[in-house]
Image (tube, rainbow, N blue to C red):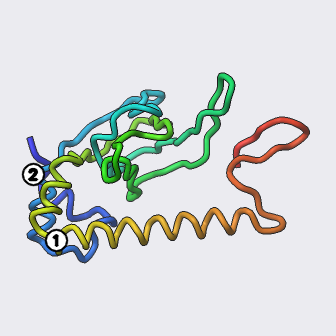
Amino acid sequence: MSVHTSILAKQPFLEHMEQRYVRMMSDCGVMQTYDAGTHIFQSGDPATHLYLITQGKVILELDVPPHSSAPFETLGPGDILGWGWLIPPYRWSFHAYALTSAEIIALDGECLRHEAQDDLHFGFALLDRFTRILLNRLEARSERRKPGGCNMLCFQEKELVMR
């Protein structure tokens, strides 16, 4: 069952997007719920969806050899999760799990790619939005690295702590 257009249209990622594109995307989406601690995907899994977080918090983790992982980002309502579905080989390079119970709109990546190929204006609108989000996240990470700042992953007294 597709996501209702009115729910999808409220997402910040789709702000000012043409209604016909929002309707098109609603046909590609489903609502999903995750209990706290539930994995949404793991590194190496096929990247099949774009996720729009509507409620709750999701934490992202990177593998840290030899046998652990470290959080690097926490996302919440209004945030998007993942563009692995957009770029071959369509695999996730990190883990994502629900930090709290979460409600998420899952948009099928294959459906979105097909629509973007059929309508280049839609494809450009998607890429424009992803580029802006990527830029904002890189700038935020850069701010945390300035003197007195800290990346989300910090080392204090030889221990890894999350900020």
Residue under numbered circle 2 = 27
- Residue at 82 percent across and 44 percent down: it is 155
- Residue at 16 percent across and 71 percent down: it is 120
Q: Is residue 1 above or below residue 119?
A: above
Image position, residue 70 (x, y; %): 64, 37
Residue 146 placement: quadrant = bottom right
| 113 vs 13, nearest the viewer | 113
Amino acid under disc 2: Asp
- Residue at 19 percent across and 54 percent down: it is 112
The residue most toward the top is 67
Image position, residue 82 (x, y; %): 39, 50
Q: Is residue 64 left or right of residue 38?
A: right
Q: Is residue 122 left or right of residue 71?
A: left
Q: Secondary structure at mark 1?
A: helix
Single out the mark in the foreground, 2 or 1. Answer: 1
Mark found first going from the N terminus, 2 or 1:
2
Q: Is residue 113 above or below residue 33?
A: below
- Residue at 65 percent across and 22 percent down: it is 67
Count the marks.
Answer: 2
Q: Secondary structure at mark 2?
A: loop
Label 2 neighbour load within 10 Å: few <14, some 14-19, many 20+: some
Residue under numbered circle 1 = 120
Check whether the beta carbons of the residues at disc 2 and disc 1 lie within 8 A of each other.
no
Q: Is residue 71 above or below residue 69?
A: below
The residue most toward the front is 89
Amino acid under disc 1: Leu
Q: Quadrant of the N terminus?
A: top left
Q: CA distance from mark 2 to mark 1?
A: 18 Å
